[in-house]
Amino acid sequence: MNVTQDLSILELVLNASAVVQAVMALLACVSFFSWYFIFVKWFAVRRAHKKTDEFERDFWSGGDLNGLYENATNRRYQSGSMERIFEAGFREFSKLKLQKGWEASDVIDGARRAMRATYQRELDALEAHLSFLASAGSVSPYIGLFGTVWGIMHAFRALGNVGQASLANVAPGIAEALVATAIGLFAAIPAVLAYNRFSHDIDRLAIRYESFMEEFSNILQRQMR
């Protein structure tokens, strides 16, 4: 028996029991989707930061609100989350301001509610697939551990049928079991790191959006006087 060949990663995967192979295949799928969502979310969060910086620079440069609103309306699909929040608030403000019988506080509250609704939709879009990364990070090690336990059980059951026990008899089964644990950790660690990083970045964006809504509400309130 060529022990080196038998203990290679490929040989261990191919010669593993059906249950352990199923666990490895499941973890491989989880890892693939985790990395897919990591790259998708990385580009989305990066774009959100860039668009937010651009709009804040334009907004606080003293530009006309009507001009900013027209620009946001014309390029709605290319605008960022903060720009869409501004668009929703200013649209509602302009509509309610023209209607008679509305108090200033009611107009501001209406604009704030419109911004809050858009804010929630934008935040939900940014947080999409984060739950998958959290689940992958917390569950994958246990799935790998299940494969490890099953592989060790399988190895010792096979060892019981052998008259004389040796390292060559038990090593392949233990090794294939440990491969399941390694794949589980490979799927879990990037998912946990990405989830924590993206959660932090999205929380920072959410704080910036909320601060903008309050500051913009104050600006609209001054225009009602």
Image (cartoon, rainbow, N blue to C red):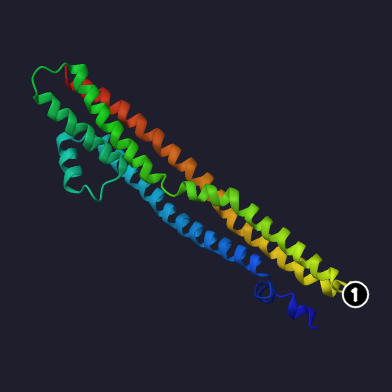
SS for dot 1: loop
The furthest residue to the bottom = 1
Horizontal relation, residue 181 to residue 26: left or right:
right
Q: Which residue type carries mark 1?
A: Gly
Q: Is residue 20 above or below residue 86?
A: below
User: Residue at the spot x=67%, y=56% of the render?
Assistant: 146
Determine the image quadrant of residue 8.
bottom right
Which residue is labeled 1 in the image?
163
Foreground of the two, 151 or 136:
151
User: Residue at the spot x=61%, y=62% of the render?
Assistant: 23
Foreground of the two, 67 or 167:
167
Q: Quadrant of the N terminus?
A: bottom right
Horizontal relation, residue 101 to residue 220: left or right:
left
Q: Residues within 10 Å of mark 1 (few under 14, many from 20)?
A: few
User: Residue at the spot x=90%, y=74% of the render?
Assistant: 163
The furthest residue to the right = 164
The location of residue 196, given as percent across then percent down, is 53, 44
Determine the image quadrant of residue 155.
bottom right
The location of residue 189, given as percent across then percent down, is 60, 53
The location of residue 151, given as percent across then percent down, is 72, 64
